[in-house]
């Protein structure tokens, strides 16, 4: 496998993971909203300016993304108790609960739909589990 193949595989895995969002009534986030959401998840209580600084997006984009996700019940905002001019952003509890439920879901159905052959599905799931155990550690991913 070369780097191009690794990138294609990564995009395909992201595509398969996103299929769990469609048709379930869950709100689908744009890539920009997803980046803002992940930043807020990692840094609860952040101001829009802090999110903008970490994501590199224009402040207007961050503000619009926060407003759209707030309207959909994904994010919540509140005035900063120390500085009433600042607004703090956090992920809504209902969104955190949904995130944990989704994260705990098995990939078997998604892989089965992509491959159709039960033997290929079983092998692919086993390979994905092996890759996860080899490549995903606290040091490599997910730990700030």
Image (cartoon, rainbow, N blue to C red):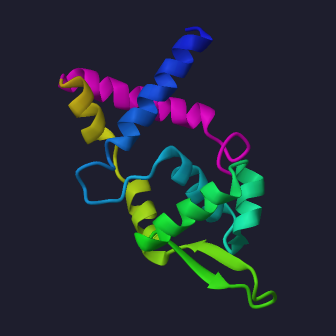
**Residue found at x 42% / y 74%:** 94
**Above or below — where is 28 with respect to 14?**
below
Q: Is residue 144 visible?
A: no
**Above or below — where is 72 with respect to 18?**
below
Q: Point out residue 3 in the picture as x, y percentages from the top left corner.
A: 61, 13
Q: For the view shown, which residue lies furthest in the top direction?
A: 2
Q: Nearer the viewer, residue 38 or 64?
A: 64
Q: Nearer the viewer, residue 115 or 15?
A: 15
Residue 59: quarter of image: bottom right
Q: Point out residue 92 in the picture as x, y percentages from the top left corner.
A: 50, 75
**Residue found at x 49% / y 72%:** 70
Q: Nearer the viewer, residue 7 or 56?
A: 56
**Residue found at x 72% / y 71%:** 47
Q: Point out residue 34 in the picture as x, y percentages from the top left corner.
A: 53, 51
- Whether residue 61 sits left or right of residue 16 in the image: it is right
Quarter of the image with the C terminus is bottom right
Q: Point out residue 52 in the picture as x, y percentages from the top left corner.
A: 72, 57
Q: Nearer the viewer, residue 9 or 57?
A: 57
- Whether residue 31 sits left or right of residue 62 in the image: it is left
Quarter of the image with the N terminus is top right
**Residue found at x 47% / y 65%:** 68
**Residue 119 belongs to the span the image colors magenta:** yes
The part of the chain drawn in magenta is 117-144
Magenta part mainly helix, strand or loop? helix
**Above or below — where is 130 with respect to 22?**
above
**Residue 135 belongs to the span the image colors magenta:** yes
Q: Is residue 15 visible?
A: yes
């Amino acid at each position: 496998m070369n780097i191009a193949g690794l990138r294609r595989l990564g995009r395909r895995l992201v595509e398969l993971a996103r299929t769990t969002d469609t048709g379930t009534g869950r709100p689908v986030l744009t890539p920009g909203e997803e980046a803002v959401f992940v930043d807020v998840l990692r840094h609860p209580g952040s101001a829009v300016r802090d999110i903008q600084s970490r994501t590199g997006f224009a402040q207007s984009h961050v503000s619009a993304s926060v407003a759209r996700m707030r309207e959909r019940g994904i994010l919540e905002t509140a005035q900063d108790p120390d500085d009433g001019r600042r607004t703090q952003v956090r992920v809504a509890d209902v969104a955190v609960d949904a995130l944990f439920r989704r994260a705990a879901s098995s990939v078997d159905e998604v892989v089965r739909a992509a491959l159709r052959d039960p033997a290929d599905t079983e092998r692919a799931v086993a390979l994905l589990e092996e890759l996860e155990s080899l490549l995903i550690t606290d040091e490599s991913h997910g730990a700030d």
